[in-house]
Image (cartoon, rainbow, N blue to C red):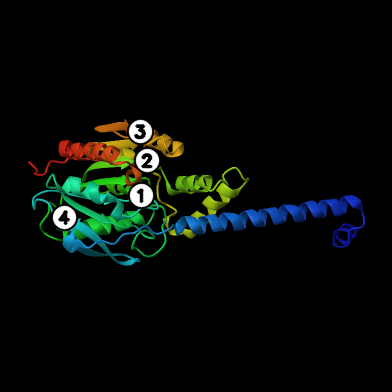
Amino acid sequence: MAFLSEIRHPTRWYTQLAIAVLALALFAFLATAAISGYVVYRMTSPPRGHSDLNLQNFPGHPEKLNFSVSGEGPRDGWFFPGLKIAPTIVLCPGYESSRAELLTLASALQDQQYNVLMFDFSGHGTADGHTTLGLQEVGELRAAMNAVANRGDVDIKRFGLWGVNLGAYVALAEAAGDPRVRAIAAESPYAQPRDMVALQVSRTGLGSVPLVTRLAQMMFGWMNSKFGKTAPLNTQIAKLSGVPQLYLEAPDEPALAASTTELFRLSSPPHELVVLAHGNYGGMLDDEKRSYENRIVSFFLANLPQTSF
């Protein structure tokens, strides 16, 4: 009783000091939690990129392709038609990017008679909602592929996928369970979305603040608890044995460069690792962008021919 009374009405200096320290620790924890929560909110609601296009006046005669995502509602993509017997290459934009940034890459692939599809992931471009850094976006990619297959004028059994960071994670995760994917080019993929959470915290400059990264990862996990059983890519990547894979490592983000190398190491042939001078396709200079496009086109020409035999 005397102990409880001392706690309620401290009279000794060391009790007062202990209570002050505990109060300060609680305040610091709550402040850290608030900061982490705000970071996660901003992370899952990134700035929107411009994603409008006048399809009637754009070269290549792209068409609007409508599809629906379970639990997310209607979406649309831009379909660039190639040969009717050709496979379709789906371009998966990266985090804080939109399909509009990939138009020249789409044109380069369409020039080789591929069908090409581009669309925006949740919380990006014209798509509503919030990003889950790849967890629900795998279903969005699958829905887009199904919509292409339902057209009836493409090779429904052969798809190629290209993506960068968020898009690369989604492409590899979908390919691990979808036999229609016959070739993948993945730039700067991460093994699991919580790794991207840590990277985004680091980008804010708060990565060195105790508990911020861990709390942000926990909050992100609580927000997306229905995906709690999703296995990381490093445990699934071996399923791609026999599927040509091109891993593109960019030194701009050391954490993503390391994960790219690790996923390549764990993957099975046929696979190739290329170290780029710079990443971020949308921000590349013209000559660098053309070189990048030529590399991607060459990969698909070698590993995903327009006609099946």
Q: For the point 21% across and 49% down, which residue is it?
A: 106
Residue wearing tag 2: 188
Q: Amino acid at mark 4?
A: Pro
Label 3 sits on residue: 277
Helix or strand or loop: what does disc 2 sit on?
loop
Label 1: element kind = loop
Location of mark 4 (residue): 59
Q: Name which residue type carries label 2.
A: Ser
Please provide percent x and percent y for residue 130.
42, 61
- The residue singled out by tag 1 in the image is 94
What residue appears at the point 17 percent right and 57 percent down from the top-left corner?
A: 149
* Local crowd size for mark 4, using a 10 Å CA cut-off: few (<14), some (14–19), many (≥20): few
What residue is drawn where x is 86% and y is 54%? 16
Disc 4 or 1, which lies upstream in sequence?
Answer: 4
Q: Tell me the CA gap for discs 1 and 3.
A: 18 Å
Is residue 222 something that shows in the picture? no
Tell me if residue 154 comes above or below residue 244 in the rendering: below
> Which of the pair 25/267 is nearer the observer?
25
